[in-house]
Image (spheres, helix red, strand yellow):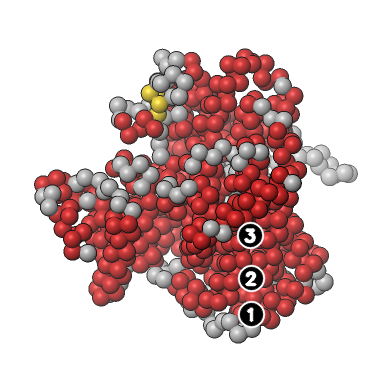
């Protein structure tokens, strides 16, 4: 009864008129973000997170969930109509959706996908709601040591499935926890790695770090490609959407089968949207009549299976995030950051004392899916045109919003510096195959790890490690890593078994990898260089924290030692691979689908250098003339000279967007802008623009 009362109270909260409008705004923004290939829900969540700072927790989470829930629905539009996945998770939809559009059935494919998305999204939300009473008594039995073990499990699980390289994921997670150590330590008041800067007393701001790691690298790569997001227009569209609705209803069993599969797999941390969609696609191909022959050639059932799983996985991903604080994806790690920013602690409290917040999320997820599908049905033609926006217009516009979003974190010029630093780090990690999600998760969970570690050691000493729950939870990563290590060593020590009856001969020489092309000098330097930089970082962290009080150095030194140990183990593994004749630095696979991978390294780094120069120019301009004036000059300059847009279009778009930003952030939100040399020299200029507008 108590659960039902909380659910109905949350329903009332969601339908507060202003809060409902905020959810709708989140849905609309999510649809815009999803339609534009290359942005996606992850960058969208990073982009919108700073703007929730002034909202109450219910509104902020409803806004973010509204945006995130409908992004997979909007991803369908470019996937079907122009054959370009809106995000990696929509790649499987292209297999049958685009062939259908090519033969004039785009409306049918969209209708089927929207209906499957709606049912899948509601299924995921219902499953989340039903999981709460089941998980509640289980979580009530958890103490501080068990919560600490869960945090460690979350870090190791996400690290273990990070782009196929467990060691890199662990190092990245340790790096994130070290970043979380920056600032004033709560127990002792010790200032850790603040470098005499008051700005760092509160730590590295999550909002600026998230935008730097995830949003800016995608935007500068889009700008460096120098082409439209979508290269061709689609044929017309929407007449037979209701035929697709009928297809989905006729295949309702397949919809529920894929929804169930998507929700269950979505709750597995680190598995990821692309893998889930392809698993659902493959499962459907085998389970429906004639699927193995017709899938990939324009079978509407392939679209239905992908989209049902695509949307239901969101509800599944929220289960471990809310109950255990273990994010099932990078997007969920950002949502965890939103929890922390609004004083919400994931875990038992969300299933006991803060059930109203949990059910607010459930209702937001369900309502957002309904609103998103209705908007798509009504405005699919208009939404499809967003995918054709040239990168020369899209990149400066979104980058301008990114800079304001980063600055809104603490409203200090240091926010922009953090954004720039982590933009470089984020792009370097993406370029050289290091997953970025573990860094974010380390930052988000670092404070909890330190808090739980201090309480556990203070209350139980070392005995907390022997508690049954802790032993059971920590056994999962220990056994996994032991299995991975044993597999690694056995692979290099055990000779291949000859077939039965075959003559025993001398062992074959090590198989050399056939290079696909020349390996660039930058790759030769940076692929091992990233490991060296990590070793220097952890060694420096260990050396500079030795004089701190025990409570202040306990977590950062423990994590730095673990990180350094992992780097050393990786070095040993690389040495063993080299002795076995394996190729360590492998050439990149050149594909025409990715224009950046297809171009020569010299040209690539030249273009990336130009893009970083544009981003850096915003910081320099902010110091000289202020942030808002710089953004106007930046948008005009980029659109005209880098994007090669006509002057009239450039001035019209840039000025309209700038006036909208000025009215929103200066007049309505009264944001205090950073001081500039020009403003200090001529104070009257600060009020001149306000008086004009």
Query: From where the camera sits, is residue 373 visible?
Result: yes
Q: Is residue 679 left or right of residue 271?
A: left
Q: Label 3 to label 2, Cα distance in Å?
A: 14 Å
Helix, strand or loop under label 3: helix
Of tags 3 and 2, which is closer to the observer?
A: 3
Q: Residue at x 63, y 59 (%)?
A: 366
Q: Where 433 falls versus 282 (above or below)?
A: above
Q: Which mark is residue 176?
A: none
Q: Secondary structure at mark 2?
A: helix
**In the rendering, at what x and y percent does residue 476 appear?**
71, 33
Note whether 466 is above or below 294 in the view shown: above
Residue corresponding to mark 1:
241
Q: Is residue 501 left or right of residue 439?
A: right
Point out the image quarter for the C terminus: bottom left
Q: Neighbour class for label 1 at 10 Å: few (<14), some, many (≥20)?
A: many
Label 2, on which residue? Answer: 114
Residue on which disc 3 sits:
366
Q: CA distance from mark 1 to mark 3?
A: 22 Å
């Amino acid at each position: 009864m108590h659960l039902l009362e909380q659910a109905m109270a949350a329903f009332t909260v969601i339908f507060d008129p202003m809060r409902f409008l905020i959810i709708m705004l989140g849905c609309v923004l999510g649809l815009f973000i999803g339609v534009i290939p290359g942005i996606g829900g992850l960058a969208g969540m990073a982009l919108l997170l700073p703007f929730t700072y002034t909202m109450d927790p219910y509104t902020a989470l409803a806004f973010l969930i509204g945006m995130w829930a409908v992004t997979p629905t909007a991803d369908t539009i470019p996937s079907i109509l122009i054959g370009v996945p809106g995000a990696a998770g929509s790649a499987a939809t292209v297999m049958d959706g685009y062939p259908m559009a090519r033969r004039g059935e785009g409306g049918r494919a969209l209708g089927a996908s929207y209906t499957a998305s709606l049912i899948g999204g509601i299924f995921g939300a219902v499953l989340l709601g039903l999981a709460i009473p089941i998980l509640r008594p289980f979580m009530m039995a958890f103490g501080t040591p068990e919560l600490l073990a869960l945090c460690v499990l979350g870090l190791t699980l996400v690290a273990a499935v990070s782009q196929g390289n467990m060691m890199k994921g662990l190092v990245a997670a340790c790096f994130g926890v070290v970043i979380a150590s920056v600032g004033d330590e709560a127990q002792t008041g010790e200032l850790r790695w603040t470098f005499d800067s008051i700005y760092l007393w509160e730590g590295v701001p999550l909002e600026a770090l998230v935008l730097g790691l995830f949003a800016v690298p995608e935007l500068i790569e889009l700008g460096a490609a120098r082409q439209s997001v979508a290269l061709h227009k689609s044929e017309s569209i929407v007449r037979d959407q209701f035929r697709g609705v009928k297809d989905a209803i006729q295949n309702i069993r397949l919809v529920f089968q894929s929804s169930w599969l998507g929700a269950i797999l979505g709750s597995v941390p680190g598995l990821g949207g692309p893998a889930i969609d392809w698993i659902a696609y493959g499962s459907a191909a085998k389970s429906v009549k004639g699927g193995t022959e017709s899938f990939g050639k324009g079978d509407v059932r392939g679209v239905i299976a992908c989209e049902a799983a695509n949307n239901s996985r969101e509800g599944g991903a929220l289960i471990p995030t809310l109950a255990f604080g273990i994010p099932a994806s990078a997007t969920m790690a950002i949502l965890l950051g939103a929890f922390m920013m609004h004083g919400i602690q994931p875990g038992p409290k969300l299933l006991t004392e803060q059930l109203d917040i949990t059910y607010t999320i459930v209702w937001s997820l369900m309502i957002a899916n309904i609103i998103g599908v209705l908007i798509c049905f009504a405005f699919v033609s208009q939404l499809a045109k967003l995918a054709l926006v040239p990168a020369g217009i899209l990149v400066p516009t979104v980058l301008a919003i990114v800079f304001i979003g980063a600055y809104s974190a603490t409203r200090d010029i240091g926010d922009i510096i953090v954004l720039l630093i982590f933009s470089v780090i984020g792009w370097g990690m993406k370029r050289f195959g290091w997953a970025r999600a573990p860094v974010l998760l380390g930052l988000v969970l670092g404070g909890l790890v330190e808090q739980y570690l201090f309480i556990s050691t203070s209350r139980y000493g070392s005995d907390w490690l022997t508690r049954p729950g802790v032993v059971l939870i920590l056994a999962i990563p220990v056994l996994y890593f032991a299995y991975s290590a044993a597999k690694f060593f056995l692979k290099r020590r055990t000779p291949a078994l000859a077939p039965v009856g075959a003559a025993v001969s001398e062992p074959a020489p090590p198989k050399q990898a056939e290079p696909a092309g020349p390996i660039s000098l930058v790759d030769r330097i940076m692929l091992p260089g990233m490991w060296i930089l990590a070793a220097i970082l952890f060694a420096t962290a260990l050396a500079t924290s030795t004089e701190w009080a025990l409570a202040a150095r306990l977590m950062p030194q423990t994590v730095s030692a673990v990180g350094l140990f992992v780097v050393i183990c990786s070095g040993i593994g690389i040495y063993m691979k080299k002795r076995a004749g394996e190729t360590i630095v492998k050439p990149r696979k050149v594909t025409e689908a990715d224009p950046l991978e297809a171009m020569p390294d010299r040209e690539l780094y030249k273009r990336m250098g130009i893009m970083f120069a544009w981003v850096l120019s915003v910081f320099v301009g902010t110091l000289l003339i202020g942030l808002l004036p710089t953004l106007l000059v930046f948008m005009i300059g980029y659109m005209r000279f880098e994007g090669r847009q006509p002057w009239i279009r450039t001035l019209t778009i840039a000025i309209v967007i700038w006036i909208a930003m000025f009215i929103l952030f200066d007049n309505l939100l009264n944001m205090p802008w950073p001081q500039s040399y020009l403003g200090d020299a001529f104070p009257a200029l600060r009020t001149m623009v306000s008086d004009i507008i």
